[in-house]
Image (tube, rainbow, N blue to C red):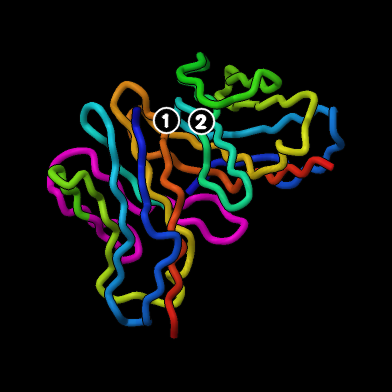
């Protein structure tokens, strides 16, 4: 069965650089969620999109932005990267009101 | 505000013994409750959910959980633990209208051979 695809799987950036993370949801899932999981921590909700519109916003820094495109894939853009942004970034997708299916994550390391 | 508590950072159990991983929640409104498992450097895998209906929910890999409204709990259980069950387990809550997850802090399950 198709799963959520995230790219890249690993990313290394310098401080103050920018990064773009991509997420391809499971076909026919119209909702996409982004989470950040710091080392040894639980995932923290960042932002979600339903039918290409932002549906909810969590603890997402102003330096970050995201969007969902017409083909339902989503991108998380991160600018002015800081050391504290190093984390595992998960994308999840779901049909309305159902459990979320998580991608394998993108491990971002900021040096 | 919604919150989830997993009071145990780690649970150790012998292979073949029953296991319980605890979760309590606090929400306004009806809760949607979920359990996920995370293996090292992997994404979260869905185990089971409670939305409505029977309080005992059966999920993947022989896991089950019981929704207890009076105790606001949703403990994860398995009758006979396997070494391969050793992983990090997260409880999550959502409510209708906003389906974003609030996760607990996770419980590391270690099954000893």
Q: Nearer the viewer, residue A53 or A46?
A: A46
Measuring from the top left, give residue A96's x and y in whole percent: 35, 27
Q: Disc 1 on helix, strand or loop?
A: strand
> Measured along the vertical axis of the image, is residue A92 above or below residue B21?
above
Q: What is the secondary structure assignment of the residue under circle 2? A: strand
Range of residues picked out in magenta: B37-65
Q: CA distance from mark 2 to mark 1?
A: 7 Å
Say if A59 sits above or below B14 in the image.
Answer: above
Identity of the residue drawn at 31% across and 51% down: B23
In this view, the residue farthest toward the front is B7
- x, y percent for residue A82: 77, 33
Left or right, residue A58 beside residue B50: right
Depth-wise, is mark 2 or mark 1 nearer the camera?
Answer: 1
The chain to which mark 1 is attached is B
Q: Is residue B51 magenta?
A: yes
Q: Left or right: where does residue A87 sit relative to residue A48? A: right
Kindly check if marks 2 and 1 are in contact, taking CB atoms under 8 A apart as contact: yes
Which residue, as the protein is rendered here, is positioned at the far bottom? B113
Q: Quadrant of residue A4?
A: top right
Query: In percent of the image, x 59 and y 48: which residue is there?
Result: A104
Label 2: few (<14), some (14–19) or many (≥20) C-alpha neighbours in 10 Å: many
Residue A34 is situated, as x and y percent measured from the top left of the image, at 55, 32
Q: Which residue is mark 2?
A: A33
Position in image of residue B99 (x %, y %): 37, 29
Q: Pointer 1: what residue?
A: B100
B7 lies above or below B16: above
Q: Residue at x 67, y 22 (%)?
A: A64
* Magenta stretch contains residue A87: no
Q: Return the residue nearer the eye: A81 or A27.
A: A81
């Amino acid at each position: 069965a198709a799963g959520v695809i995230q790219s890249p799987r690993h990313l290394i950036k310098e401080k103050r650089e920018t990064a773009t993370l991509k997420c391809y949801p499971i076909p026919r899932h119209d909702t996409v969620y982004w989470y950040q999981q710091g080392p040894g921590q639980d995932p923290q909700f960042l932002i979600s999109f339903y039918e290409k519109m932002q549906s909810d916003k969590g603890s997402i820094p102003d330096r970050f932005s995201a969007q969902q495109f017409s083909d339902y894939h989503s991108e998380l853009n991160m600018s002015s990267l800081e050391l504290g942004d190093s984390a595992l970034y998960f994308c999840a997708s779901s049909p309305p009101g159902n459990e979320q299916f998580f991608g394998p994550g993108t491990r971002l390391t900021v040096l | 505000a919604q919150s989830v508590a997993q009071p145990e950072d780690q649970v150790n159990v012998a292979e073949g013994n029953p296991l319980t991983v605890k979760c309590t929640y606090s929400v306004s409104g009806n809760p949607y409750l979920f359990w996920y498992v995370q293996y090292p450097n992997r994404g979260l895998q869905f185990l089971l959910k409670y939305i409505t209906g029977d309080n005992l929910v059966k999920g993947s890999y022989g896991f089950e959980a019981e929704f207890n409204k009076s105790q606001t709990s949703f403990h994860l259980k398995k009758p006979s633990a396997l070494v391969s069950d050793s992983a990090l387990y997260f409880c999550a809550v959502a409510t209708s209208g906003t389906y974003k997850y609030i996760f607990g802090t996770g419980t590391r399950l270690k099954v000893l051979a």
